[in-house]
Amino acid sequence: MSTNSKKELIECERLIGIRIMQEDAESIYSLLQTEKNPIFTMEMIPYYALFVQSCQEYMGENLLPKSIAKDLKDIRNHIKAYTDGFGKSQKRVAAVDDAQDRDFKEQLRFGFLKKFNIHLNLGTYWTEEKQIIGNTQQLANFLSVESVFDPKIKEKNYQMGYHIGSFVSSFRNKLANFSSFPIIERERKSISINYYCDINTNKRNNLLSKGQKKEINLFYLHLLCNMNFVKYILRPLFRDGNIWVFRVEYIVSYYTLRALERLKNYTENNKDITVESKEIHDILKLGELLFKTKVRNCMMHYNLESAGVISFENIDKPFYGIIENCFDGKSYQEYLIELHELSNMIIDFLNNQFDFSNVKLESL
């Protein structure tokens, strides 16, 4: 490639990176305009944080107050929460459970009641079709909530939401001077999360598996909530193929897969936990075909210059030909179908760790 051609390609990569930021901003802005459900909002904050931080890293400047920027950076990093060694993940899950246990036990009005272990320290959120899509311990972990009864939390969350919304709105308006607003196609205007089930994780209940350690139950549950939220709550809001939703599904599936890999590695060297390693092996095998390093970098960051994922001949294809360039001509739609298949495979494995048939749901 000539020097001029290389310069042209680098400029093209720069412009495509900016356009992807603009498309992501428009998708997020669309959600901020329509989705007011507090559970949905809390579940989405890590992915909003990822967008804000990735944009700021691309621009090389911080446009938010230092305290908000730090909080958002920490929350973004929680997307990778369970990809450390499984021993660390197990301790993390247990620490959050213990903190929530103390938190709710302290709310009992009479001290003598605490020894009866009657408090409920885990709230779970469900679809009408009985798909679990979130839980309070997962949210406390991802949002760095030390106590749900801290009176400062409401103001802190308000400020975080305000600055995220302001950033997205300002960013999209500035990009509109560069290019016209992208058209974002929605399947639904809004979505409801209407059911819940509260339990005490220290006692026998209909939610957690009786044949597995509590920490493993909760580890599986948090992973399942992440995966189900994308499949049953986020994806149905947009027309299939939306680039930002695709990126979120890719990221959630990838880090869930890595968490299962760490679990498998742990069980191969320790005897205190048993898992269906053959099923995890099959998931990892399929994941190896879909998750390539240079594609993953594009999902987490917007700088495409010299990343080797753009070519002039495929620019007009969906997602700017990045999939075709990285997967020997495989189309974006073909890849999307395979990613959905992997997501379903992971969800099926996680669902099989539980028996939710006797879970009693209540209306929010």
Image (cartoon, rainbow, N blue to C red):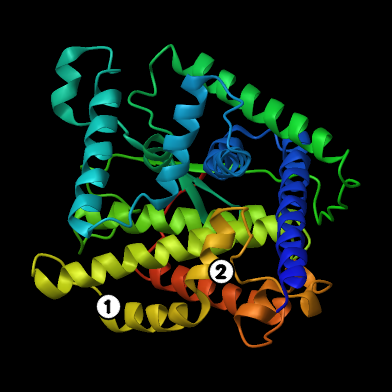
- According to the picture, the residue beneath numbered tag 2 turns out to be 295
Which of the pair 56/215 is nearer the observer? 56
The spot of residue 207 in percent (x, y) is 35, 53
Residue drawn at (55%, 44%) of the image? 50
Is residue 337 visible in the rendered image? The answer is: no
Where 214 sits versus 288, above or below? above
Determine the residue located farthest toward the left in the rendered image. Answer: 271
Residue highlighted by disc 1: 276
**Nearest the eye: 233 or 255:** 255
Residue, x 21% and y 35% (percent of image)?
98
Cα distance between the residues tagged 2 and 1:
29 Å
Pinpoint residue 20: horizontal percent, then vertical percent.
73, 54
Q: Which of marks 2 and 1 is nearer the N terminus?
A: 1
Q: What element carries label 2?
A: helix
Q: Residue at x 81, y 46 (%)?
A: 189
Q: Is residue 293 above or below residue 81?
A: below
Q: Quadrant of the N terminus?
A: bottom right
How many numbered badges does the structure rendering display? 2
**Which residue is located at x 61 percent, y 54 percent?**
303
- Dot 2: few (<14), some (14–19), or many (≥20) neighbours within 10 Å? some
Give the SS element for disc 1.
loop
- Where does residue 295 sit, x and y in percent of width and height? 56, 69
In percent of width and height, residue 198 lies at 40, 39
Image quarter for residue 32? top right
